[in-house]
Each structure stands twice: as C-alpha cells, then as structure tokens.
Amino acid sequence: MRIFDPHVHMTSRTTDDYEAMAAAGVRAVVEPSFWLGQPRTSPGSFADYFDALIGWEPFRAGQFGIRHFATIALNPKEANDPRCREVLELVPRYLDKDAVVAVGEIGYDSMTPLEDLAFAAQLALAVEYDLPALVHTPHRDKVRGTQRSLDVVKESGIDPGRVVIDHLNEVTVELVRDTGCWLGFSIYPDTKMSPPRMVELLRRHGTERMLVNSAADWGRSDPLLTRRTGEAMLAAGFSDDDVDRVLWRNPVEFYGASGRLDLSDADAPADFAGNSIKRGGA
Amino acid sequence: MNLRFGYGTNGFANHRLSDTLAVLADLGYDGVALTLDHHHLDPYAPGLARRVSGLATRLIELGLSVVVETGARYLLDPRRKHAPTLLHDEREVRLDFLLRAVSIASDLGAEAVSCWSGVRPPSVDPQLAWDRLVDGCARLTEAASKAGVPVGFEPEPGMFVQDLAGWRALHRALGMPRAFGLTLDIGHCRCLEPEPVADCVTAAAPWLVNVQIEDMRRGVHEHLEFGEGEIDFPPVLRALADAGYRGLVGVELPRHSHAAPEVARRSLTFLRAAAGQSGGADRTAATAGQRAPGQRRPAGAVPAPEALRAALATVDDGGWLDEALRRVAADPSVISRLFPAAARRCGRAELGVPGWTADEAARAVLLATLPADRAAVQARALYRHGDAAEKRAVLRALPLLPLGASAVELLHDAIRTNDTRLVAAALGPYAAHLDPAAWRQAVVKCVFMGIPLTCVDDLDHRADSELAAMLAGIADERHAAGRELPADAAALLARLKAEKGI
C-alpha cells in the first residue's frame, strides 16, 4: 500500500513516527503550516517556522525515504492577532519555493472580520501564484463555517478543482460534494473522523475528489490512521485500486496541480552516506 | 592535434579578395578571416547580394571556412580611424554596419562575426560609454542569435574593453546570452593579460568562437610574425586542442601586406610545426603533478560562471535561463523570484562540469550576473530566505562571486545546521575564509555526521596537528563505544600522525 498523507504536521512528531510511517507505506507527506499550540507573538517566529518547513523538516523526512512538501499561509486563528498580521507580507516569498505545493491552511476559526481579510487575501495569492488552496473548516459552528468558506472560495474566482475543503464529516460532506472542490477528511483517534466512518462515507459518496489524511500534530493523533483507513476499506470490500486512488493518486492529482510535486525519487533511499539523526551522532 | 588554421584578409590589403582566397587555399589554409572593407566585399557598394552569393560559392569551391571581421580602419569614416564606434554619438552608424555584417555572415555560412568596442572618445564619460556598449552589443547579439551566427567580441589593447576581465564584465552585463561569444587574440594575451597565455586560452575556452594568432611582446601591442615575439606557441596550441576548440585559428598580421603571400606561407609552416610538438601533453601532466600545496588551484576546482553557463547549454529550459539572465542584468532585484524557480525550470540533472547539477549551476550564473556591488547583498538575502537547495546553491556560488571574505558568516550559519547538504557545501573553496578554529570544528562535524571528507576543499594542505588531536579524541570515544572512525577520517588521522610526529 503506497500512501501520500496530504495533511500531517510532522514538525511535532518524532523520528519514531517517521520510521513507523515509512514502514506502513507512507512515501510522501504534505505539511500545512498552522498554529503551534503556543501562540506566536511576532512575524519572526513565523519566518523561522516557514523556513523549517522548507529546510530542516524535508531533510528529516528524507532520512526515512519520505518526500516532504509544505503549504504556507497565515492560519485563521492567528490572523486575529494584530502582532502577526505582517505575516501576510512574508507569505508570497515562500509561495515561490519548489516544495510549497499549495496555499494553506487558510479559512475560518471564529469567523471574524480579520479572518475574512486573511482568507480572501490568501485565496488571491493562490490565484496569483497559480497554486492550489487548502481550506481548514472550523471546529465550532462547523456547518455555517463550511458554507461561508464555500461562498468565499466562489467569490475569489479560484477554480474549485484547485481547492480542498478539509476536516469534513457526515454533517458537512453534502455541502461540498457538488461544488467541484476536493473533500478532505482528517482521521483522528477520538474526534473528527474514524476509519469505519470514513469507509462508510466512501461507500456513500465514491472515491472521486476524496482525500484522507491523519492531520497528526502535537495533540492526541495517530499518523498511521491513513494506513488503518486503507485496511478498513479493503476489509469492507473496496479493491486495492480504490485504496490506491484514495491514498495515493488523489493527493498526487490535487497537489500535482501546483506543477511542483516532484516525486521522481520517492522510492529511492534518501541517505547521505549516513546521517546525524538515525545514528544520534550529533 | 587537429586545429584549423586561417589567415586574415586584412593582411592581404594589396590583393583582390578573389586572389587572396586562391593564394590561401593553395598554401593549405583551412579558412579565412574576412575583414569587410571598401576593397573586400564592400557592404555599402551596389550588388551586395550577388557578390555575397558569388563569394559563398567560391569559398565552397576552395574548401575554405570563413569568419567575418569588422575592424576595417576607414570604411565608415574616411578621416577618423575606426570611427564611429558603438561608443560615439553616431553609434547607430556602427550598429547598422555590424547588423549588415551579421546578415552577410549568415549568407556566407560564417562561423562567427567578430567585433570590438573601439577606443572611448574623450567627450564620452565612462558610464555613458558602458551603457552605449551594452545596448549596442545587446541589439547586435539579438540579431546574431536570430541569424544563427555567434558574435565574437574581441578585447583589444587600448580600446574601452581591452582584456578578458572587461569581456567578462560585458558578458555578465548582457545576461550571458549564448550568441555572445569571445574572439581571443593570442598575441593580446601575451601583451596584457595577467595569466600565462595558455591559461588564458583554457579559462576562455567555453566562450571561444574565434581565435586570432600572431607573436607579441609583453606590453607592446604590435602584431609580429611568429618567432619575433615572446610567445611559446606549442603549449598555447595544445590548450586550444585540449579545450576542444573547433573554430578557426586565424593569423592576424595586418601590417605585413607588402609581403603577404610569403608571410602567409611561413606562418602556416610555423603553426603546423608548433602544433606537431605533441610532447606538450606529457609536460602538462608532469607539471600538474608537481604542483605544490597552496599554489593556484588546477583549473576546474572552481569553474568560471562562463563554464557553468556553457555547460547549461545542454539543458532544455525553453530559453528560460537566457531570459532570466537578461532580466537580472537589467534589474538585479528580480533575482529574488527567479532564483527559487531555477530548479523547476532547468531541472536537477548532472552537468558536464564535475560536481555541478543544473539547478545549482543555473543559480550560480544568476548570482554571477549581478553587478559586483549587488552580489554580496543579494547572496545574503537569497541565502536567508532560501529553502535548503537555494541555500546550498548560494554556498556553492560564493567562490565564483566578487565578494572577498565578506560572506563568511553564511558559512558559519550553514555549519551550525544539522543538514548534511549545507554543511558539506560550506566546506568548498570559499571555506578558505574560515579561521582555523572554525574550519577544524567544521571538519570534525563532518566526521560526526558521516559526510565524506572529499567535500572538504584543500583538506590535505590545511589539516594540522590540532585537527589531528581532535580526530584522535573522537577515535578514542568511538573506540570506547565499540565503534570506529569512518575510513576516510581514520586514514587522515593516520597520515597526520605520521607527518606531524604525534
């Protein structure tokens, strides 16, 4: 089973996770820039974080044969902090980078006017830089937040086929199914979606434009739930080809629209004559 | 050695062009450097198309190749030698002539069109002269590119661009277009270049489209017959052959027209003899082997930006790099968006230059195109805001740029990381600017991180007893843990112990 996790925050995971993911068949990941749990207080913190997403983290992933890509944006939660607003001026510079394959995560947290501004401005950047967009849907007031996100996407003029609406569930899936946008589902141990519920949604709505991710971060989460979902699909009678479509070909198609998804050596061992991480040398 | 010799028609000023060609073909020359002049294919006289067509046929019949030269003395102005040039107020007259020369060259199937800057008129200040030269060359190169004939721009002693350094500056200002090459006069190298003549040839090789040859003395710009000057020709011809130069090597003796047939005969005899001294290759190898540590690096350790640009000619980028270099030359600030895009546009394939990939080479030539006063600021900014591959490309380009030691803090930053790609790139030739303590720490870090020591430039020369002591310390720790030093570090330690008597 080859797996492309289209949404996972590897910065907060250990090398044990990388090792287990590689063993489970994960060959490529996209790490969206997001909140870090602890609020940041200046644009400089974001610059260092973005630099890590296109510098150190891909190197770390490479030690385990995993290709690492990123999406860059000012996230909706911190868009509300006036100390962080200048981050919007930093973002464009990163959108030129080879491994940046989308603008994200953008969208709503509390649906404030400041979130409106950041969301619209960054959708415009996605159009300008010819990149897909990754839209986070809020945890609170999710149905209205999802509907409003779709409205903003429509107003922006971006091709809906280049947008994924993420963190969907049984309640919000219908809102997005016929919009032309891609549908993202985060599989969590307790909250959001579980593998059996995901299988049920795939049975009901098919595999087209469906993206399954672990969204693993520093909270209680599991980067192997992509694999568990694939296994649950097989157990429920889906074919190997269905699983490959959902866990590999769909994310490759979605992020491939950036023109920057270079998977040419995704199967080669990324080893530089030994390294400091696996050996614990440095 | 398989060089092709030619002779300049400006050395046959008292002959008809048709007679000149017949004499040269009879003597056994492979080609002719045709200086367009009032008596040799006058580009302003009637019936040009018919005359060009007739000449093209005649060259084929005689088996002669041709390059077109534009250095006639009184073709454009009967009173002022060489005037107007691209630097004069009436520069459009010169440009019109050069564009005619490109058309003629194209119709003749010429290998190149050669030209020079001219002497700067006292009334034109240097900045204006430079701007005019860049503009004129840009327009000429565009036309030459469309016509499929390369421009061979010739540095000429006493003129505004008089040496290879000047040619390089002009080349960069133009954005290093493929159609803008170099006409190298071997005698001029002896006259005023700081490097030995053969080294000039090797350094200039990637851009050579035309070569002129004659003897000369240091500091005296006088074209002399072979044997009358100071040049040792066999190594020079060997350097041309070794560089794979396939164009004409044309004798340039414009003041010998009074005895042209005899001078042409003697010249070819001399050149053939000089080229036949095939012992040159062995001598070169022996000399290289004896090079003491710390001497000038063998050519190739730090490739010239021009060499990287030439190697990139094999990359199919749809003309992206040409356009990018042109844009950076016109406005240095646009490099901030072109630099990150270079890998997507040029790919990451290995090039003919050992150790260089297309993305890093493209980024290096983009940096090298910047004016000298912008290179340091931009290198710092591109490193600061670059992803790991961009940072690495900046590090690798540092020794190619006019920076002195000013960018050494970038090496410190890279060596602080735990990214093997960056640490390795920081220990290239630019690491000569690291102080000994920082350099030793970086070498030992390589050992820790498993980076092959082959990435450390000048290691054999620079390794000292202090480094040996640090390596011995790691060896002890490793031994205590039941592990060994990597083989390359162990070999270095053993050698240092033997040499330094530790």
Image (spheres, rainbow, N blue to C red):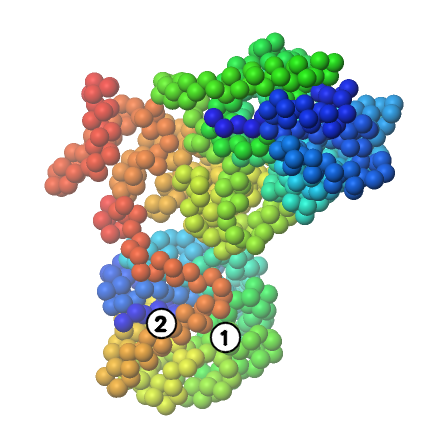
Q: Amino acid at mark 2?
A: Trp
The label on residue A163 is: 1
Q: Chain of mark 1?
A: A
Rendered position, A256 above or below B243: below
Element class at badge 1: strand
Q: Amino acid at mark 1?
A: Val
Q: Residue at left 49%, top 55%?
A: B344
Along the horizontal axis of the image, is B478 left or right of B149? left
Q: Give the residue pinned by disc 2.
A: A248
Q: Quadrant of residue B299?
A: top left
Residue lying furthest right:
B79
Of residue B4 and residue B362, the one placed in the foreground of this image is B4
**Foreground tag (2 vs 1):** 2
Along the horizontal axis of the image, is B467 left or right of B55? left
Q: Chain of mark 2?
A: A
Tell me the distance, in whole angstroms, between the alpha carbons under discs 2 and 1. 17 Å
